């Protein structure tokens, strides 16, 4: 018996040092992941209007959830400690109150652990985001659980420690910020392995097309979400353009390219709003209402387009499996010492036959109706109907059976 090798779960980064021993390689990977998370936290500060205020969307929560899912459960305590250390360092660097921030951070880590636990149970041993149901489930968890719990934690700590009055708009703003962070960052990180595999197996022309698609996302985002104030009103109908690069990526490449397109668009939209630029900033509302509108637009667009991308990807996998199954079946039929004819259910398709049948009765001419071939081999007019009736009885019984039919046929030698 050939031993089966256990599949890797949730690949995040490919090994960088093939000849390195397992311990140094694991330490190097952990160091790279920590540095990557620190870069995400530093990037997040560019999405915050002013110190102490909620960001337009919050990438660290999605990064922590993805980091946990990319690791086995035994590594979760280490991931939480490293993520918390990076976040505390960022809090000290920007000068926020340490005690209040630490308490908010504790609640945030618990929310990340709960979210990752639910997603791990959802995915089991299969890759995350492998079908449309995954996108629906993650969206529901992010919007109905992760975001509200994180917002409640922030509101509670601010109300008790700072004594500030919390309006209804602030928790909604915080909730959408956290939910959007999960929906934009978690799929992006968890599809890095898919992106790396795609890049390895495709040639220069396909890679160039992918780069062009991402550049289109950047260009359309700048045109619409970073337009000068005097031009923003006229460019509002161009909001539909933002979906074009993502739709292109969903059809041509897969979910990973859609995740990058949405990340680029959401980032440019947030930067544009903070700079008082773009079509959202031109709306006659307060900055809080504009931020809320941008959050809703970003979240709905991300979920919708990722759902479409997952559906395309699921269809591609199903088609690939069907083609592989058909190829295996054809090889099996070709190798049979018995003449075999497999008729297609689609009108106009030439029935598949093996070499043995062609040797017995001659090849089938695909340009002619099958009735010509039946006549050439001397079949009576009722033989094809007898075969169809036998198949119909087999299907009606719900099982595959064989019905012997005797007929005199004329071979290729006459």
Image (spheres, rainbow, N blue to C red):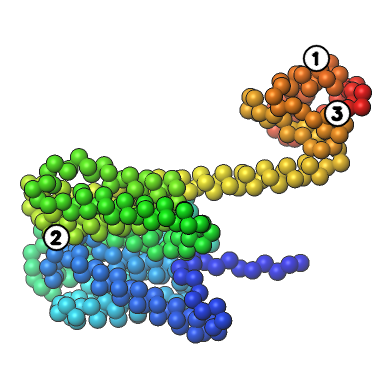
Residue 310: x %, y % from top left: 44, 49
Residue at image coords 66%, 46%: 325
Any part of residue 121 in sight: no
> Which label's residue is closer to the chain start, 2 or 3?
2
Decide: is 86 above or below 229: below
Residue 86: x %, y % from top left: 29, 79
Q: Which mark is residue 69?
A: none
Measure the alpha-carbon separation of dots 2 and 3: 77 Å
Q: Left or right: where does residue 12 sit relative to residue 404?
A: left
Q: Left or right: where does residue 125 sit relative to residue 299?
A: right
230, 80: nearer the viewer: 230
Measure the alpha-carbon separation of dots 3 and 1: 17 Å
Q: Which mark is residue 361?
A: 3
> Which label's residue is closer to the chain start, 3 or 1?
3
Q: Left or right: where does residue 123 sit relative to residue 183?
A: right
Residue with the mark numbered 2 = 274
Secondary structure type for disc 3: helix
Q: Left or right: where does residue 149 sit relative to residue 288?
A: right
Residue 216: x %, y % from top left: 31, 51
78, 259: nearer the viewer: 259
CA neighbours of label 3 inside 10 A, class few (<14), some (14 to 19), many (20+) = some
163, 377: nearer the viewer: 377
Res 405 → quadrant:
top right
Decide: is 215 above or below 390: below
Residue with the mark numbered 1 = 381
């Amino acid at each position: 018996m050939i031993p089966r090798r256990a599949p890797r779960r949730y690949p995040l980064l490919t090994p960088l040092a093939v000849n390195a021993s397992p311990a140094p390689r694991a330490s190097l990977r952990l160091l790279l992941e920590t540095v990557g998370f620190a870069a995400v936290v530093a990037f997040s500060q560019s999405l915050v209007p002013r110190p102490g205020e909620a960001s337009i969307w919050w990438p660290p929560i999605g990064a922590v959830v993805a980091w946990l899912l990319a690791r086995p459960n035994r590594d979760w305590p280490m991931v939480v400690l490293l993520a918390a250390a990076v976040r505390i360092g960022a809090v000290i660097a920007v000068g926020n109150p340490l005690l209040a921030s630490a308490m908010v951070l504790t609640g945030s880590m618990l929310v990340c652990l709960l979210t990752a636990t639910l997603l791990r149970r959802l995915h089991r041993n299969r890759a995350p985001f492998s079908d449309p149901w995954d996108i629906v489930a993650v969206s529901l968890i992010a919007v109905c659980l992760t975001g509200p719990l994180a917002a409640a934690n922030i509101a509670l700590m601010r109300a008790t420690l700072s004594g500030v009055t919390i309006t209804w708009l602030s928790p909604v703003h915080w909730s959408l910020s956290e939910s959007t962070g999960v929906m934009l960052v978690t799929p992006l990180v968890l599809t890095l392995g898919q992106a790396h595999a795609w890049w390895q197996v495709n040639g220069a022309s396909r890679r160039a097309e992918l780069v062009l698609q991402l550049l289109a996302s950047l260009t359309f985002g700048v045109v619409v979400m970073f337009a000068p104030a005097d031009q923003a009103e006229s460019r509002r109908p161009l909001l539909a353009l933002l979906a074009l690069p993502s739709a292109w990526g969903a059809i041509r490449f897969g979910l990973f390219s859609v995740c990058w397109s949405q990340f680029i668009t959401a980032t440019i939209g947030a930067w544009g709003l903070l700079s008082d630029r773009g079509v959202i900033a031109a709306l006659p509302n307060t900055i809080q209402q504009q931020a809320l509108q941008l959050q809703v637009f970003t979240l709905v667009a991300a979920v919708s387009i990722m759902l479409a991308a997952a559906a395309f990807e699921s269809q591609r996998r199903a088609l690939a499996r069907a083609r592989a199954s058909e190829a295996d079946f054809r090889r099996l039929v070709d190798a049979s010492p018995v003449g075999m004819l497999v008729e297609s259910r689609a009108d106009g398709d030439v029935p598949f036959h093996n070499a043995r049948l062609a040797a017995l009765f001659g090849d089938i001419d695909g340009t002619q109706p099958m009735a010509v071939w039946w006549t050439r081999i001397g079949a009576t007019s009722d033989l094809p109907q007898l075969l169809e009736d036998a198949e119909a009885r087999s299907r009606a019984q719900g099982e595959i059976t064989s019905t012997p039919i005797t007929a005199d046929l004329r071979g290729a030698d006459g």
